[in-house]
Amino acid sequence: MKAVRDIGLLYQRYITQLLRNPVWLIVGFSTPILYLALFTPLLKHLPGTASQPGGNVLDLFLPGILSLLAFASGMGPGFSTIFELKAGVIERFRVTPVSRFAILTGPILATMVMMFVFDAAVVAVGAGFGFSVHWLGLAVLAVLLGLVMTIMAAFSIATALAAKEISGFAAIVNGINLPVLLLAGILLPISLGPLWMRVLAHFNPLYYLVQASRVLAGGTLTGAAVWQAFAVLAPLCAVVLAWATSVFRKAVA
Amino acid sequence: MNEAGFTAVLPGLFKNAYGAGKTTTLRILTTLLPMDSGTATVAGFDVTRQPNQVRSRIGYVSQLGGADELATGRENLLLQGRLYGASRAQAAPRADALAGLLDLAGFADRRVSTYSGGQRRRLDIALGIVHEPAVLFLDEPSTGLDPQSRANLWDHIRALRERGTTVFLTTHYLQEADVLCDRLMIMDGGQVVAEGTPRALKQQVAGDSILISLKQGDQGTGRAVPVLRQESYVRELTVEDGQVRLYVEDGGTALPQLIRLLDKAGVAVRSMSMSEPTLDDVFLRETGRSLRDAETPEAGPADRTGVAA
């Protein structure tokens, strides 16, 4: 019970901070919309995508944007962790009797709620341009998006605590960004790649999300990609959270 | 440090410490860092085995502060109170009381990003005592403050102490240690090199020095010196330009005796001043270098840990 209360308090604190940062809000809303606006026209002429029967190119691309958003949103808490480490905030929380798990998950939960707000904006804009909305599929997809965001956030926070400096952390984030995104098939379908790439993609957790997201957004709830995504992402989420909590026990500036 | 609720046995603790080990010590006592070996008890609980009991009884203000800049002072105090278990209804009057106690009331509803250094530090301390801890740890509380804010901070620390809080602070300022602390520990290279009350530590050094300025200048010193040399409590005597400098064991007792003595000998005194040995003298004796040298990066920082109980 105490942990729930602690998570609530730290969730509230973090979301208040996010909402008081106008730059963050503007970028948070505009980035996914810009992706939709600037990338979709390019896809229209890609062989094998536009020709899908009765399909809008957004049906393929928008779930990828939501997956990308889950991946990118998870990096945010890592950056703020470094800032808070430098500002002494992390130490201030760690000398209180507050649950260590709450110090980790309060911000993750706040980031997740903000991500769902951005997701809703993307879906609303997409629907206006012909994306066909399947509510049930999107609801299940939201669970997967939450899982991936939590994995990325816990990973980024733990990495930030280890890196301690913004430069080192930014290098790590940039270093994993490109391979993880390309091997997930977010921007371009992985089926366009050679066999070795398609094999390698199976070691990328984000790949399962992207595969499932296209199935779910199409309204199919029972595809193999869906249960595979849950089977990979749910245990991974638990492992990463446990690891990040243990890193938090020893984090000092 | 028993009377304050501390005991610490920390052998080989500071093997990996960068500087003198003061921040490492604080982090261990405040449950932030694990111990390699040894035990530490704070406010009656074991730091390693009962960290949550320790946490609810201590306050800690790091050098970094740690208040939320995007929140107001009051919001910071309310959240901190609730993190220590207070309900919303309990936290509000406590925040008001702390704002009053630390002179924050005038700007408690402004965002922390607009605060001056002194205002911020007072908020940091308010955050550290929101749950009325038995022991408050302050890591270099006055670093970076202008002299006026520092004096103001000292008043607040003294007030806390009078209200019964044990204050455990670290500092680079000898004057601060001298003014605020009942007990003092000097650390160097991860080791405690001296411990005691500031007065006892200073008395171990050289005694007090007394400077006597004479009206008749060199002629006066010529007559005064033979008289002064006969006194057994005068350890050392130097003549400098119409002035005589003496080193005595206890200046307070020597001063009236010297006045009477010189008066009887017919030597006219212009002024007489006494200076006690400073903690800098203590530091010099214990570490072989003055604090100014010790603070240069090459030599590594050296620290004092004080307990104002």
Image (cartoon, coloured by chain):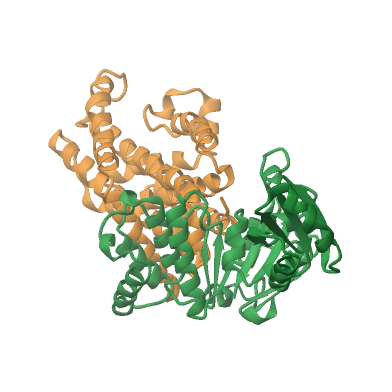
Chain colours: A orange, B green
| Whether residue B234 is situated above or below residue B142 in the rendered picture | below
The residue positioned farthest toward the front in the image shown:
B266
Please state the total of marks drawn on the protein image: 0
Name the quadrant containing residue A12: bottom left
Q: Residue at x 47, y 29 (%)?
A: A178
Q: Quadrant of the C terminus of chain B?
A: bottom right
Q: Nearer the viewer, residue B298 or B74?
A: B298
Q: Position of residue A236 (x, y in %)?
A: 52, 52
- Residue A212 picture location, percent across and down: 38, 44
Left-right relation of A241 to B208: left
Q: Is residue B6 left or right of residue B162?
A: right
Q: Quadrant of the N terminus of chain B?
A: bottom right
In this rendering, would B230 be left or right of A66?
Answer: right
- Residue A118 appears anywhere in the view: yes
Q: Residue at x 53, y 54 (%)?
A: B63
Residue at image coords 61%, 79%: B43
Q: Residue B298 in the image: x percent, y percent?
A: 72, 38
Q: Quadrant of residue A248?
A: bottom right
* Residue B124 visible in this rendered orientation of the protein: no
- In the displayed structure, B52 sits above or below A112; it is below
Residue at image location 53% in from the left, 53% down from the top: A240
Is the residue B104 above or below the residue B68 in the image? below
Q: Position of residue B248 (x, y in %)?
A: 78, 64
